[in-house]
Image (cartoon, rainbow, N blue to C red):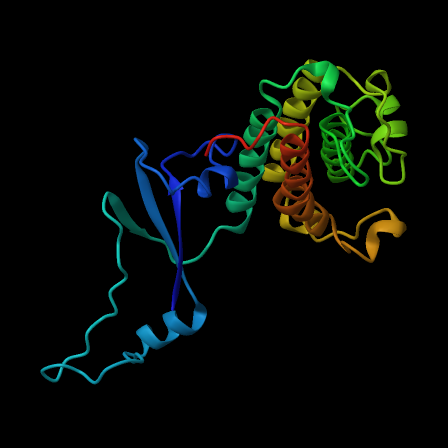
Amino acid sequence: MAYSLNIPRSDDAATAAMGVLSRRAGPSNRTYRRIECPSARFRASRAAGRRRGPSPVGGRLRQPRIPTPSGVAPVSAPACDHRSFVLRLYGGTLDRAGRLVEGVPDERWAELPHDGAKHPAWALTHLCLASGMVDAHLRGEGDELGVVPAAWAAVGMPGADLVADRSAYPAGAELLEVLGRAHAALAATYRAASDERLAAEFPVEAYRAFFPTLGDAATYVMAYHEGYHLGQVSQWRRAVGFGPIAD
């Protein structure tokens, strides 16, 4: 078995995207390459000259063929590069964050159309804080928040009350600017961190049950956390009447 993803031809982690991976339904002018990450079992069976499936044809084993969509060049890799993939996902959510609030007037960012809604003023503040916190911990700066203003913690950290008062949150342009800088800082720190640093124990005991190591925290924040909260913003966008963003 081989697992594959169609990923844009780009080495820039800030432009390749989880969001891009979901936009394959319609025609596109982008060129894609295929990155294949065969499982260890598959690689071992190939090395031993074995495979599952129909019996050999003409006394010879046929190598399995992986269908290649039209216009996609197969490029094989011996293993997935976990760190590069996390960076690609992280770059994709930054792009999606901007697209989700594009065209929405700043004064409406704190509307609460129903109970349980998460508006973008809170969500983007929260995402800035999460990236800033993990970046600071990776660099050994304790309870600092990296490039994110410390005052934002009062309205954006877990446990803070979410309110419909737009003045309680930073302006939209500032949120997007700080989110971009927080992304760039964490991406650079994560890319440069040694394996030993990523394996180090997460310094805040309250979070340790959820992500025991710094690497666990970075993977969670960069590859899952942002997509989760941006899903809430996408739902909010529909609820206040702006509809979904174009794929």
Tell me the quarter of the picture where residue 133 sits.
top right
Q: Is 25 situated above or below 196?
A: above
The residue nearer to you, when weighing 35 against 108, is 108
The x, y position of residue 99, in whole percent, is 56, 26
At 46% across and 37% down in the image, what residue appears? 20
The residue nearer to you, when weighing 23 against 47, is 23
In the picture as drawn, the residue positioned furthest to the left comes out as 58
Is 53 on the left-hand or right-hand side of 168? left
At 76% across and 37% down in the image, what residue appears? 117
Q: Is 61 situated above or below 144?
A: below
The x, y position of residue 234, in whole percent, is 62, 35
Q: Is 211 situated above or below 191?
A: below
The residue nearer to you, when weighing 184 against 237, is 237
At 63% across and 27% down in the image, what residue appears? 241
* Quarter of the image with the C terminus in it: top left
Is 63 on the left-hand or right-hand side of 84? left
* Quarter of the image with the N terminus in it: bottom left
Tell me the quarter of the picture where residue 233 sits.
top right
Number of numbered tags placed on the structure image: 0
Is 90 on the left-hand or right-hand side of 43? right
The x, y position of residue 177, in whole percent, is 66, 18
The x, y position of residue 70, in whole percent, is 23, 47
Tell me the quarter of the picture where residue 21 sits.
top left
